[in-house]
Image (spheres, rainbow, N blue to C red):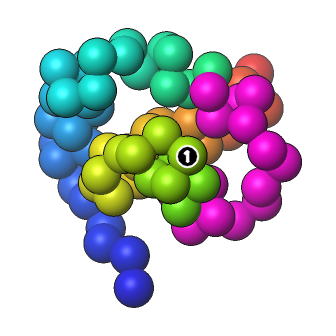
Amino acid sequence: MSQVFSEETHRNMLARIPHCTGREISDWLRTVDEGPALFRFEEKVSWLRHEHNLAYGHAKAIVHEYDLRRAARKLV
């Protein structure tokens, strides 16, 4: 079962990702966008973890941010 992070925890996790991975969030979001056409959240997380050797929390935060931004684009 996946964990549910608070908004503050999510923001803190995103802030640490560039330091931990050497890549900016925008790079990771582009990676998810250009990656395989996976539909389920956990499939995307699993793909990032295995393809890019990310920790579960980092992969989850990236996919969550990707989904938030994609949803925001649909509202505009």
Type of amino acid at the residue the image marks with label 1: Glu
59 relative to 19 in the view: left or right: right
Q: Residue furthest right?
A: 37
Q: Main secondary structure of the magenta part?
A: helix
Name the residue: 64% across, 64% down: 43
**Residue 37 falls within the magenta-colored stretch:** yes
Measured as percent of width and height from the top left, residue 47 is found at: 59, 54
Name the residue: 56% across, 26% down: 29
Is residue 13 depicted above or below 25 in this figure? below
76 relative to 28 in the view: left or right: right
Residue range of the region highlighted in magenta in the rendering: 31-45
Is residue 50 depicted above or below 18 in this figure? below
13 relative to 52 in the view: left or right: left
Quadrant location, the N terminus:
bottom left
* Residue that label 1 marks: 51
Measured as percent of width and height from the top left, residue 32 is found at: 64, 35
**Residue 66 falls within the magenta-colored stretch:** no
Measured as percent of width and height from the top left, residue 5 is found at: 26, 59
Q: Quadrant of residue 18?
A: top left
Total marks drawn?
A: 1
Q: Secondary structure at mark 1?
A: helix
Measured as percent of width and height from the top left, residue 17 is found at: 26, 29
Relative to the observer, which residue lies in front, 70 or 40? 40
Name the residue: 17% across, 20% down: 19
Is residue 66 depicted above or below 2 in this figure? above
Relative to the observer, which residue lies in front, 64 or 51? 51
